[in-house]
Amino acid sequence: MSTNAPASSPWIIATRESRLALWQAEHVRDILSRRFARPVTLLGMTTQGDQILDRALSKVGGKGLFVKELEVALQEGRAHLAVHSLKDVPMELPDGFVLAAVMEREDPRDALVSPHHASLEALPAGAVVGTSSLRRLAQLRALRPDLKIEPLRGNLDTRLRKLDEGQYDAIILAAAGLKRLGLESRIRALIAPTVMLPAAGQGALGIEIRSNDPELTTAVATLAHMPTWLATLAERAVSRALGGSCSMPLAAFAQWREGQLVLDARLGHPESGELVAASLSGAATTAAEAEALGMTVAQELKQLAGPAWLAALHPAA
């Protein structure tokens, strides 16, 4: 039996219940409702990723824990679309699901949040910095091996509260989330991509639907921002080729310069603190071209890292 919504019924958006996730879902709801003169409602859900806060995501299943329950709601017909932070979306979607649009990117940079220190460079030796991202951890180690890096889990408000309670001297967060929630004043310094390369998809929203819903596919496609979509396709291709997940210290960021897509990627060693980096630019007017760019950069990273390094990234393999 088809679970596609009749034209007269509301579209239902499955969403996590954190303040940032709700902002993102409400943003999409308002655009769809206005554009198609149709009711759009939210189905708030708590995911495994929201419930497990005492262990690193890399130890309990990765960022896919933030999307699985939402996909179940889509599969069962309780919802018709899900709005995700694209960097949380696994590189491969289950059968029957499709990423129907990637929206225009917010600021993709990382941000330093600190009550007392104005920049990464200003942090004193031994300062405690909070992050649970292996990507940030690897780059921080390369930049400032004298810092003490401690795990930091929870939604954005929880992370800020832990900082304000004095558990950390500084924390690093995605600038996009802070800006979307009107918390830009908490940012002490935006970290340039040349200093700390963002995660694949950082700052962009992805909309996931069932692949058998042509009406919704057409509607959601109107929200797509092709420059962002092509850039993030290239970034995600790097991650896919390397088997990337939140258990891998991998960064990939693409930006447009004079009609060319410039893709940078960095891969950290899980123990030594070393980094390898690759960069490539090229035409990317189609999804295939964008993904080919990402595959080429991934291959260069593999060659630079070598077999022993790659094996250390996949200890269970």
Image (cartoon, grey):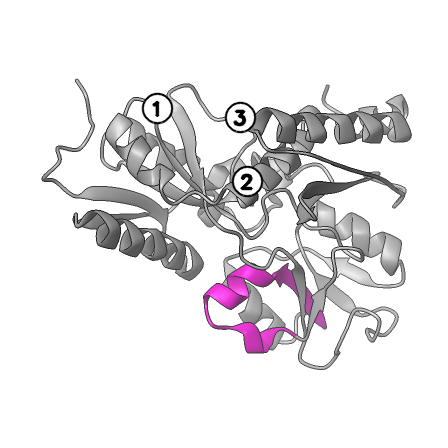
- Image quarter (top left, top right, bottom left or bottom right) of the C terminus: top right
- Magenta-span inclusion, residue 176: yes
Dot in front, 1 or 3? 1
Q: In which quarter of the image is residue 266?
A: top right
Residue at screen point 27% across, 36% down: 80
Q: What secondary structure is marked by label 2? A: helix
What's the distance in space between the residues labelled 2 and 3, CA to CA? 12 Å
* Mark 1, residue position: 211
Q: What segment carries the magenta color?
A: 169-187
Left or right: 111 with respect to 203?
right
Q: Of label 2 and label 3, which has the lower sequence position?
A: 2
Contact (CB < 8 A) between labels 2 and 3?
A: no
Horizontal and vertical percent position of residue 12 = 24, 43
Image x and y of residue 262, in percent? 73, 43
| Nearer the camera: disc 2 or disc 1 | 1
Who is closer to the viewer here, 288 or 167?
288
Q: How crowded is mark 2: few (under 14 residues within 10 Å), some or many (20 or more)?
A: some
User: Mark 2 is on which residue type?
Assistant: Lys
Residue 73 visible (yes or no): no
Give amino acid for label 3.
Glu
Picture layout, residue 137 above or below residue 89 = below
Q: Which mark is residue 92?
A: 3
Quadrant in which the N terminus is drawn: top left
Question: Toward the viewer: 70 or 315?
Answer: 70
Per the image, the residue denoted by label 2 is: 63
